[in-house]
Amino acid sequence: MANNEDLFKKIISHSKEYGFVFQSSEIYDGLAAVYDYGQYGVELKNNIKDHWWKAMVQYNENIVGVDSAIFMHPTIWKASGHVDAFNDPMIDNKDSKKRYRADVLIEDHIAKIEGKIQKEVTKAKKRFGETFDEAQFLSTNPRVLANKKKIEGIKNRLYPAMDNNDLEDIKLLIEELGVVCPFSGSKNWTDVRQFNLMFSTQMGSLSDDSDQIYLRPETAQGIFVNYLNIQKTGRMKIPFGIAQIGKAFRNEIVARQFIFRMREFEQMEMQFFVRPGEEMKWYEYWKEQRIKWHLSLGIPESKYRFHEHDKLAHYANAAADIEFEFPIGFKEIEGIHSRTDFDLEAHQKYTGRKIQYFDPEINKSYVPYVVETSLGLDRTFLAIISYAYTEERLEDGSERVVMKILPALAPIKAAVLPLVKKDGLPEKAREIMDFLKFDYLCQYDEKDAIGRRYRRQDAIGTPYCITIDHQTLEDNTVTIRERDSMGQERIAIENISGIISKKLRSVK
Ligand code: GAP
């Protein structure tokens, strides 16, 4: 794991050094778990949003978008269950003064036992070679069986305790398992307490409880409360979806993982409204569609896996995470939830308004069921930069760091580089820049030797470098260098735009 931790640190410092992500309020010593996106970060983020929006809204005729406000009527959060149930059980270590999510401490303990099982499998694979039957080994090896039993036992305690809000038993479990604080190594724990993750503030000039409002902890509710507006004005027929990209806020207890877990973050969510009873079909459909989308980012399948939930959120009857292998391990990047009619029913009840759909095909009115896809924009950003970050040793012995970001998502599409800063080359390069910039975000750079300029572009993931040299003045040709192969071709100036456009399309 040490290597992956190193890698994570390198990615964080590269992100800062090259203008992708900065700690928020850094000159005031920063604000925990809040980040700003710099000049290249904002471009990558916008490109991810655009890619998702197209896949959802543009390519699906039955999905439309919405942009709802962050501030919403406070009763919405009562109806959605967030006021009463959007809690995490927290526990503090008295020696390190660090705060943890109690359930995560126990889940990390389970992951350690799972790690032991995996080690047994790896060892046995080596020992038995080709003849190794993993399924048989997992169901018969005594050490594996004992560890599986341990895991079962822990889950059978943890999940009911979480469901029944039995905080004493969660604490007892932590003590019985001998869980230690990763910082101090001590078992000196406080009691477990519930902690609501919503940020609240006051609206208007009066500061009593009646004016308390919340910063939304998910974008989904902005979709639910606009269901009637959009269904009616858009004449939408079930099944249909509403998509939204926007900020969400959670007062996370554990917030030490860069942009993986933030207190202010962005979600890309889509609620798909379906006929009751058909939700499982659509749940499976969206699981398949969403993993295809992730693979379209140019990241191999081996970096993703599904994790079906044993313990369901208060609104769901089925739920799965798509997990990505971040440098900190496989972690959730997107949730796909079958939310039943929980939310619309609740808003119907709290508002007294009828939120129903008349289905002409079956001649019946009902409250639609919902399958949601909920993707974290910042986690997608982190997945892309983690996979893209590559250190390479070149043939001449030098080293380069290159961000192998899918060209269609790269912040800067092309760099325009006069070979030298004289002989009319900058003027010619400016001419090229002036027509290319209307099609692509390009960067003009004439400072330093050409090799250093290539390295700078590699470090921010620019897929194409256009170099203007003395031959350009003679025959109107330039070289185009491809980031990953570093191969160069000579092409006519008039073909640059078309060639870049073709290259960007061919990798989409
Ligand atoms: N509407 C359902 C919902 O919000 P969730 O699993 O709590 O479900 C969905 O969140 C996604 O939002 C997660 O898969 C993750 O990518 C992202 N997310 C959640 N909390 C986050 C945080 N504190 N920082 C960054 N991303 C977060």
Image (tube, helix red, strand yellow):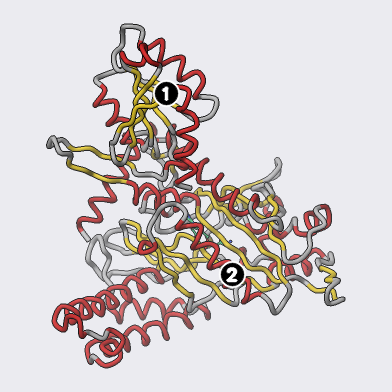
| Residue highlighted by disc 2 | 285
* Residue 424, horizontal then vertical, whole percent: 36, 7
Across and down, in percent, residue 367 comes to: 77, 71
Q: Quadrant of the N terminus?
A: bottom left
Vertical side of 37 occupied by 421: above or below: above
Q: Nearer the viewer, residue 277 or 259?
A: 277
Viewer-nearest residue: 500 or 284:
500
**Location of residue 130 in the rendering, given as x and y in whole percent from the top left corner:** 20, 81
State which quadrant residue 415 falls in.
top left
Residue positioned most to the front: 475
Query: What amino acid is at disc 1?
Result: Ala
Q: Residues within 10 Å of mark 1 (few under 14, many from 20)?
A: some
Q: Is mark 2 within 8 Å of ligand 1?
A: no
Identify the residue at image location x=23%, y=80%: 121
- Tag 2: residue type? Tyr
Q: CA distance from mark 2 to mark 1?
A: 46 Å
Q: Residue at x 40, y 17 (%)?
A: 476
The label on residue 502 is: none
Q: What residue is shown with label 1?
A: 492
Q: Nearer the viewer, mark 2 or mark 1?
A: 1
Position in image of residue 496 (x %, y %): 45, 27
Q: Quick check: 276 left or right of 55?
A: right
Query: Dot 2, how many residues are within 10 Å of its Cα: few (below 14), some (14-19), or many (20+)?
Result: few
Above or below, 453 against 271 in this view is above
Ligand 1 within 8 Å of the CB at mark 1: no
Determine whether, in the image, residue 244 is placed left or right of residue 144: right
